[in-house]
Image (cartoon, grey):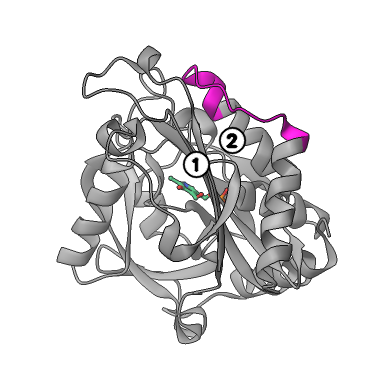
Amino acid sequence: QWIFLNGEFVTKENAKVSVYDHGFLYGDGVFEGIRVYSGNVFRLQEHIDRLYNSAKSILLTIPYTKEELTDLIVQSVQKNQFQDAYIRVVVSRGVGDLGLDPYKCQNPQVVIIVEPLAIFPKHLYETGIEVVTVATRRNRPDVLSPKVKSLNYLNNVLVRIEAHLANVSEALMLNDQGYVAEGSADNVFIVKNGVLYTPPGYVGALEGITREAIIDMARELGYVVKEEPFTRHDVYTADEVFLTGTAAEVIAVVKVDGRTIGEGVPGVHTKRLLEAFRQKVVAEGVK
Ligand code: PLP
């Protein structure tokens, strides 16, 4: 397995970063998670754009043009020869001293890791998953925007810990006003009377690329999709609930805080959207 690090491809064993890297010391950096389906990188342009926007927001200069980085990502996939894979692109502030000062970090570090796919167990797509809502809140959009996919994932980690303590595999975060924001690494949709609802960006969620793909695809299929804030009550009383994300794709949620959603099995709309999404991902992509 070849990993791109410090301007070259190295083996996994040799892929090491400094303990003085501010990504490690302060979570100072940004990242992306991207999927490869049948050798095609799914929505690479969108991931590149989001990465550069995240970096711009935190005044981090990525030392490659978008075209160069796109090329490096495609090269990483080809070099590793995986047909179905997960790509992690990390850009950290780079090596500095122990102080917080990012201006002492002269060389942002770019890392590209391509791994064979470790998808969620197949049976979970058939049964759906149970989630809880947790005490951890999404950070306010006016502080550090949730649109920035930064290396500061502590609240997402805490969400996972709270999910684990509740014996479920994922959980939903609310924003500071109590509106449902998103999962630890996925966006949330509810379906009511055949209409799809997902929280708008200003509620405080990452603008998921899978979320966008699902919105477009659902509209093409004739669904009405509304980006509107909603509360836990709306989730509990929805006909269907599902999560979307690069790793999760589309996964049904069948129980929320002990309330059974619909019939307690993945609903027809969720199943239809997952099927359409799986067809779409192989039909699309950059070779
Ligand atoms: N929300 C958060 C916090 C995430 O980290 C992710 C994963 O990237 C998502 C949502 C889903 O976004 P995407 O569909 O772009 O993977």
The residue sitting at 76% across, 56% down in the picture is: 217
Q: Say which element carries label 2.
A: helix
Label 1 CB, ligand 1: below 8 Å? no
Spatial CA distance of label 2 from label 1 is 6 Å
Quick check: 249 above or below 150? below
The residue sitting at 55% across, 74% down in the picture is: 267
The residue sitting at 60% across, 59% down in the picture is: 193
Farthest-out residue, left: 165
Three-letter amino acid code of the residue under disc 1: Phe
Residue 141: x %, y % from top left: 41, 24
The reply to whether callout 2 and callout 1 are in contact (CB within 8 Å) is yes
For this view, does 70 lie left or right of residue 137?
right
Asked if one can make out residue 223 in the rendered structure from this viewpoint, the answer is: no
Let me know if residue 82 is in the magenta part: no
Residue 38: x %, y % from top left: 75, 73
Residue 255: x %, y % from top left: 34, 70
Three-letter amino acid code of the residue under disc 2: Leu
Asked if one can make out residue 138 in the rendered structure from this viewpoint, the answer is: yes
For this view, does 23 lie left or right of residue 58?
left
Q: Which residue is mark 1?
A: 31
Q: Nearer the viewer, residue 158 or 28?
A: 28
For this view, does 195 lie left or right of residue 78?
left
Q: Quadrant of the N terminus?
A: bottom right
Q: Which residues are magenta?
A: 54-67
Let me know if residue 64 is in the magenta part: yes
Quick check: 3 above or below 147? below
- The circle on residue 51 is 2
State which quadrant residue 127 falls in. bottom left
Q: Residues within 10 Å of mark 2 (few under 14, many from 20)?
A: many
